[in-house]
Image (cartoon, grey):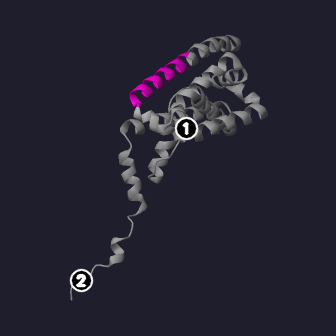
Amino acid sequence: MAFMRSPVRSRLAPPKFYKVILSMKKITRFQKYKFVALLTIFFFLLFSFWLNYNINIAILLTLLCWSLYILCIPAFHGKFLLGTPYQMITGKKLLYPEVYLWFTALLLNIFTYFTIRWIYLKALSTHLLLRIISTPWPYWLIILFCAIGTFYKFFVGAPNFYSKKYLHYTVRTLLVCVGFFIFLYLSYKELVILINIRA
């Protein structure tokens, strides 16, 4: 009697961890290196704050520094901070990770600003973030250009963006450069004042 292969066996899905391994191969080295670099900076900040404060304050200060990076540096942060680990764990791509990161950073700062505002004064970077949040003109220009640079693809629409991708990549790059220049210029002026106050 010939051996008959079960028809059910061939239809069984491969184990889930195979999908995770395959999705990790699709992630570029640059994405992995940048994710590891950002994760290293995150834990370095956490440890440095922990040396001076208790763990609760250290975690909140680290998250506020992270929100400064999200809200004030115009770039596609979500792909590296949230999209890459999500793809590594689940094997699926996360749609619009920037939206999740932005609203999380906004909610964190709204809660902190109206409940425990004094914690911003514990570090120079968070003090700078407090000045940006509490001074609409001209510091909200930083947040505005960061939002435009981060969500540019959503503003023009994905089909339109990819149909004229060279034009839109050029425009977005110019917006990112202008936003980054405004952030550096205004931050430099404010940091000089803050350093003189602390000295």
Per the rendering, the mark at residue 128 is none
Q: Which residue is mark 2?
A: 3
Does the magenta portion include 176?
yes
Q: Secondary structure at mark 1?
A: helix
Does the magenta portion include 146?
no
**Main structural element of the magenta stretch: helix, strand or loop?**
helix
Q: Position of residue 70 (x, y in %)?
A: 58, 31
Residue at 39%, 27% (x, y): give it.
Answer: 166
Q: Position of residue 77 (x, y in %)?
A: 51, 34
Q: Position of residue 62 (x, y in %)?
A: 62, 34
Judge from the rendering whether residue 191 lies leftward or rightward of residue 34; answer left or right. Answer: right
Image position of 148 with respect to 83: above or below: above
Residue at 39%, 50% (x, y): give it.
Answer: 23
Q: Which residue is mark 1?
A: 98
Image position of 4 with respect to 112: above or below: below
Image: magenta residue range: 164-181
Residue at 73%, 36% (x, y): give it.
Answer: 111
Instruction: Work out how far the residue at label 2 is from the one at label 1, CA to CA, in angstroms.
Output: 54 Å
Amino acid residing under circle 2: Phe
Mark 1 Cα shell of 10 Å, populated few (<14), some (14-19), many (≥20): many
In which quadrant is the N terminus drawn? bottom left
Q: Secondary structure at mark 2?
A: loop
